[in-house]
Amino acid sequence: MSEAQAITHLLQTCKELSVFCSQNGWIINESIHYEIIERQADSLLIYVTFLESIMEGSGCQCDQKSCYGRLRLKLNAAGEIIGVEPA
């Protein structure tokens, strides 16, 4: 798996991304985009944007909100992602 695929998979499955939701909605996985803004031997700092789906009480989507934030991805010696935290 390439670095880009590993990061994308992580962002689609990690709970840490939800801290950037403003309305307690659902993250639209297809809308997730990121940019690596800092690269160190033991971590990557990324800037993430995505759309949050806001639901009505009836279960219908009523709105989408743009969300964004920074995450630090912790790396092991082989460069594999071993942890993630809001930055």
Image (cartoon, rainbow, N blue to C red):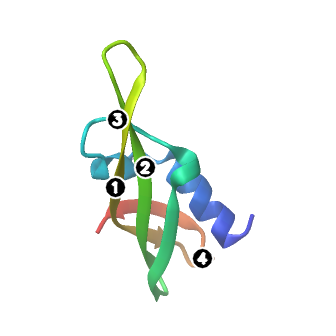
Secondary structure at numbered mark 3: loop
C-alpha distance separating marks 1 and 3 = 11 Å
Q: Is residue 2 left or right of residue 6?
A: right
Q: Is residue 36 above or below residue 65?
A: below
According to the picture, the residue beneath numbered tag 3 turns out to be 25
Of the numbered discs 1 and 2, the one sitting upstream in the chain is: 2
At label 4, which amino acid type do we have? Gly
Furthest-front residue in view?
62
Residue 28 placement, left or right of 55: right
Q: Where is mark 1, residue-wise?
A: 67
Residue displayed at 53% across by 73% down: 76
Residue contact at pointers 3 and 4, CB within 8 angstroms: no
C-beta proximity under 8 Å, tags 1 and 3: no
65 lies above or below 34? above
Marking on residue 51: 2
Measured as percent of width and height from the top left, residue 63 is found at 36, 36
Residue 15 appears in the figure:
yes
- Which one is in front in this view, the residue at disc 2 or the one at disc 4? 2
- Tag 1: amino acid: Cys
Quadrant of residue 24 within the rendered picture: top left
Element carrying mark 2: strand
**Residue at the location (28% across, 69% down)?**
87
For mark 2, does the 10 Å Cα neighbourhood hold few (<14), some (14 to 19), or many (20 or more) residues?
Answer: many
Compute the Cα span from label 2 to label 4: 29 Å
**Residue visible at 72% across and 69% down?**
2
Near-viewer residue (16 or 64):
64
